[in-house]
Amino acid sequence: MKLLINSLFVPCAVVAAAIFSSGAVAKADVGVYNQTLQSTAWVLAKSEGLTSSGSGVLVDSEKKLLITNFHVVGNARTAVIFFPEIKGGKPVVERDTYLKTVNKIGVKGRVLAVDRKRDLALIELDNIPRGIAAVKLAETSCGPGETVHSIGNPQSTEALWVYTSGTVRSVYQRQFRSGAGDHDFMSLETQSPINQGDSGGPVVNAAGELVGISQSLSAKARLVTTCVDISEVKYFLESDWKLAPLPITEILEKAELEFTKVDGDALEVSFEQTDKTKQSVFVTAEVEYFEQADVRKVWALAATLKEAPSVETTMKLLQQSAQTKLGAWSIERTRQGDFLVIYVCKIDATATPRTLKSTMEYVAKLTNLTRKDLTPAETNTDPATVLNAWLSN
């Protein structure tokens, strides 16, 4: 007996084999999903008054470590983690169920380290619920044409623990910029459709082994998804990472410094000097980074000059830059043609509140003393103008 399919005669045995094979694949996919589900998390973090939602994956049960994207946690240093609740052999997918029982099933997490270059963050959990297990890390990455599976918590649907599958397009080193900063990592590019909220979730191979972390979906192409390759995940876990920087507002509050948010990415602190004058010192909220080096900029204005500093003054500033304990002098020109003499230094973004306070006090003192040499007559300066001019450079 033969069946007519698309005007072609195909033996029944072939059709039966195809149907059987399809069923076997489907069962295999369900198995991978259920296996990966045990390691997948819903991650909530709050930074600057905004709550972000993403995904994560447990990578170490003994140390209670979970991996997600840096852009999921941002500047937050704590997070709330949910693992799937299983009822009747299936995961509970309604979000409200988890939010309404956060005191019972939510897990507190502390952001230990971040790697902006690789867009990765490491979270230490208070505990691991029963039935949850760490994912196994693949020995090597996938190659083009291989099937991959992922689980995430997309904001485009009301459901959690959403499954997606696709194939690998390519694996290559990629450099690009996103809202979270500049990135440079080995990219596992797939055609799996992911959405906001899937970020940070696991991407696994047919054996259920972690081969990547969902990162972003291209807005310029159809079904081009970027994932952080397993080689980058392993490097991050094995590297000598350090504690992630705290938000600048939290550091200033712990240092018992009163501050004002000003235009741009900066905060202003006023220090009273021995001559009873006030000296404003600025610090950036944004962290500059290279690899594991995280720094913040601290600066203050010494003078606004109508003419360019003389050679004598410039040489004096250069000499002082070489002798000072921190930072150096910079001369910037505004759009109005004025010359700003600014003292600026870079401080480790993971420095303690006390260290930041000492640094800002030093900058205020040095700037105030130099002002007297540069401005024989009293000069009124507008901090807002200074700030905008400095940030524009």
Image (tube, rainbow, N blue to C red):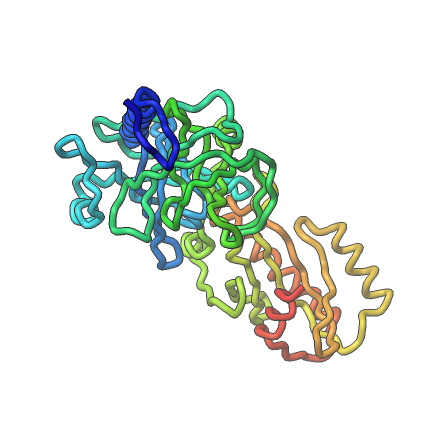
Image position of 366 with respect to 203: above or below:
below
Q: Quadrant of the C terminus?
A: bottom right
Q: Is residue 341 left or right of residue 8?
A: right
Q: Residue at the location (26% across, 40% down)?
A: 82
The answer to whether residue 31 shows anywhere in this view is no
Please give the count of numbered marks on the rendered protein. Answer: 0
Image position of 320 with respect to 224: above or below:
below
Q: Quadrant of the N terminus?
A: top left
Q: Residue at the location (23% across, 36% down)?
A: 84
Q: Residue furthest right?
A: 311
Image position of 318 with respect to 41: above or below:
below
**Between 279 and 112, the one nearer to me in the picture:** 112
The answer to whether residue 7 shows anywhere in this view is yes
**Between 355 and 389, the one nearer to me in the picture:** 389
Q: Residue at the location (74% across, 69% down)?
A: 373
Residue 309: x %, y % from top left: 81, 69
Q: Residue at the location (48% across, 49% down)?
A: 222
Q: Quadrant of residue 112?
A: top left
Q: Is residue 25 left or right of residue 308?
A: left
Q: Residue furthest left?
A: 88
Q: Quadrant of residue 148?
A: top left
Residue 204: x %, y % from top left: 40, 30
Residue 86: x %, y % from top left: 18, 33
Residue 359: x %, y % from top left: 57, 52
